[in-house]
Amino acid sequence: MENDDRARVLDPERDADALKALTHPLRIRLLGMLRQDGPATASELAAATGETSATTSYHLRVLAKYAFIKEAEHRDGRERRWQAVHALTSWDSAALASTPANRAVGSALRRSQLEHLTRAVARFETEAEAGPTQLEWVGAGGISDWLPRLTPESLAELWQTLSGKVDELTARDAEDPRARQVVVFHAALPMAQPAPAASPASEGPA
């Protein structure tokens, strides 16, 4: 898959430093906020995260160094505004599991996604408390899990199907005024194989 205006695909070997930069929890949170809420300054992001402007400014510069974000149009000349370059970032999971260093990066990235899910749930619940969320949205969304038995080929096909469907529906709803941003999480992790049952001990002669 080639990079385009929507997605950036990182190579775990060629882009090792860029991937490592994403393992910092505040950095990946700042990137997510710019993608979700649009351009912002270091001060605005500091207020939203409870960090200092100096801290968010430093981490924004690191994200810019590795081309995850870039300067946006400024409202005035006093402070930089930043915007995300791509809507999502992906990588080859198999390559990310090829070395101990890459596995550590992959583990950190997965945990960042779990933190993102936790924040998304909290934001949804806060919105629902502030004013009843439209029932059509509540009924259409949700969190669920399945435990199918699949081959590696079928699991890869499932990922491709989900990604393709998201692209298809996003394009279909692009001009619909009722459309709103939706956080879509999907995880597919092979379960550990159960230990084989012990064979019953054979009885000896009486």
Image (tube, rainbow, N blue to C red):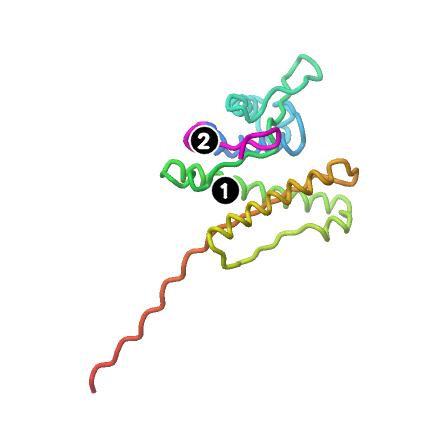
In the rendered view, would you say 163 is above or below 28?
below
Q: Quadrant of residue 40?
A: top right
- Binning the other alpha carbons within 10 Å of mark 2 as few (below 14), some (14 to 19) or many (20 upward) gives some
Q: Is residue 152 left or right of residue 127?
A: left
**Secondary structure at numbered mark 1:** helix
Q: Between 133 and 85, which is closer to the camera in this rendering?
A: 85
Q: Dot 1 corresponds to which residue?
A: 111
The three-letter amino acid code for the residue at tag 2 is Lys
Residue 181 placed where, x, y %?
69, 39
3 inside magenta stretch: yes
Q: Quadrant of residue 95?
A: top left
- Binning the other alpha carbons within 10 Å of mark 1 as few (below 14), some (14 to 19) or many (20 upward) gives few
Q: Dot 2 corresponds to which residue?
A: 20
User: Magenta stretch: dominant SS?
Assistant: loop
Instruction: Please report whichever mark, 2 or 1, sits nearer to the chain's N-terminal start.
Output: 2
Residue 161 placed where, x, y %?
59, 47
In the rendered view, would you say 5 is above or below 198?
above
The three-letter amino acid code for the residue at tag 1 is Arg
Q: Which residues are magenta?
A: 1-17
In the rendered view, would you say 83 is above or below 144?
above
Q: Residue, x 57% and y 47% (percent of image)?
A: 186
Residue 172 placed where, x, y %?
72, 40
Residue 52 placed where, x, y %?
57, 25
Q: Between 164 and 115, which is closer to the camera in this rendering?
A: 164
